[in-house]
Image: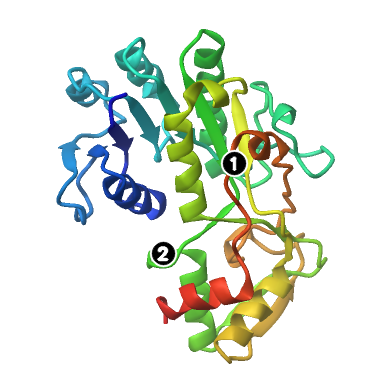
């Protein structure tokens, strides 16, 4: 089996960890992105291009890889162009979606089957409507035999990117700024370690047939955190008292919150049936170790 992977993206929260993991596992890595951020992996080949433009996607037509991992799938308009380029040429296409594709008015926790292509509304706002549009294209491609597997991760927890929510939370704590939480105390968070998400991505490209029995998989730790519980734990680990202010969801804007105030929890039984590794790693000691890198 070829050990050459194309990453669409490669410089963001997930892409950097993914690229590093693949290179350490002796994969050849090609990245396709706009080149706006420094490539920290000199061993990876970078093809500069804007996936929003079909003419630039054509730069990939002669690329020979075994698998594609799409870490920046926000543009449904050109997804079919990408799929057409790789039809019959790859064993696996991993598309990173989001729990934000799930709509309102359903019982929690969400099962994968509870998302359908007719959904138009995200519990998490306008941004995730773009993910819903992408998933409609992905689902149709899957139904026509394209070897795609969709992952819907919970909040990513990583240790180095300056624009993560945890970095923002630490900034608020260190600067003694207010931290807004919904006053209904019903906001529940689920996380997944970026490293664990990467491990699942790589397991998919190693065992594509096993995963392609299902179109999509939720991926999250079993542990569910009350939003205030999470904030107070982070504050305790860095020995700073948080300035919590509770805001009504009726009057407050989502922009005031570090984490979306909507309660989204998911069931990951489908993934646990096929992924043989451990997903639950975020103990207090694990979080403390990663926080050291952010302070």
Residues at marks 1 and 2, CA–CA distance in whole angstroms = 31 Å
x, y percentage for residue 123?
69, 44
Using the image, determine if residue 10 lies above or below residue 146.
Answer: below
Using the image, determine if residue 202 lies above or below residue 78.
Answer: below
Instruction: For the residues labelled 1 and 2, say whether their Cβ atoms are less than 8 Å apart.
Output: no
Residue at coordinates 48% horizontally, 28% vertically from top-left?
207
Question: Residue 276 shows which numbered tag?
Answer: 1
Sequence-earlier tag: 1 or 2: 2
Using the image, determine if residue 140 lies above or below residue 192.
Answer: above
Q: Is residue 18 left or right of residue 106?
A: left
Count neighbours of disc 2 (C-alpha within 10 A) and say few if under 14, some if 14 to 19, many if 20 or more: few
Residue at coordinates 45% horizontally, 46% vertically from top-left?
198
Q: Is residue 221 left or right of residue 161?
A: right
State the SS at label 1: loop
Q: Is residue 229 left or right of residue 54?
A: right
Residue at coordinates 56% horizontally, 11% vertically from top-left?
143
In this figure, which residue is indicated by the disc labeled 2? 163
x, y percentage for residue 225?
72, 64
Which one is nearer the viewer's eye here, 38 or 278? 278
Count of numbered circles on the image? 2
């Amino acid at each position: 089996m070829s050990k050459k992977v194309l990453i669409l993206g490669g410089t963001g929260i997930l892409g950097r960890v993914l690229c590093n993991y693949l290179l350490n596992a002796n994969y050849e890595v090609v990245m396709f992105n706009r080149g706006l951020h420094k490539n920290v992996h000199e061993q990876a080949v970078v093809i500069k291009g804007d996936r929003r433009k079909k003419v630039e996607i054509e730069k990939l037509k002669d690329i020979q890889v075994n698998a594609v991992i799409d870490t920046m799938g926000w543009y449904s308009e050109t997804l079919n162009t990408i799929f057409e380029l790789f039809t019959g040429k790859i064993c696996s296409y991993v598309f990173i979606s989001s729990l934000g594709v799930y709509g309102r008015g359903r019982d929690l926790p969400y099962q994968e089957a509870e998302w359908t292509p007719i959904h138009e509304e995200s519990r998490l706002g306008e941004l995730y409507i773009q993910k819903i549009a992408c998933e409609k294209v992905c689902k149709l491609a899957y139904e026509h035999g394209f070897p795609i597997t969709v992952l819907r991760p919970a909040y990513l927890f990583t240790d180095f990117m300056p624009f993560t929510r945890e970095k923002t939370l630490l900034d608020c704590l260190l600067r003694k700024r207010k931290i807004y939480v919904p006053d209904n105390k019903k906001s529940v968070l689920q996380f997944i370690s970026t490293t664990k998400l990467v491990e699942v991505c790589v397991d998919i490209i190693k065992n594509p047939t096993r995963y392609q029995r299902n179109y999509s998989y939720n991926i999250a730790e079993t542990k569910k955190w009350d939003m205030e519980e999470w904030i107070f734990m982070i504050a305790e680990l860095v020995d700073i008292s948080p300035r919590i202010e509770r805001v009504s969801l009726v009057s407050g804007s989502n922009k005031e919150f570090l984490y979306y105030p909507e309660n989204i929890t998911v069931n990951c039984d489908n993934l646990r049936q096929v992924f043989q590794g451990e997903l639950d790693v975020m103990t207090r000691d694990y979080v403390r170790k990663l926080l050291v890198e952010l302070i």
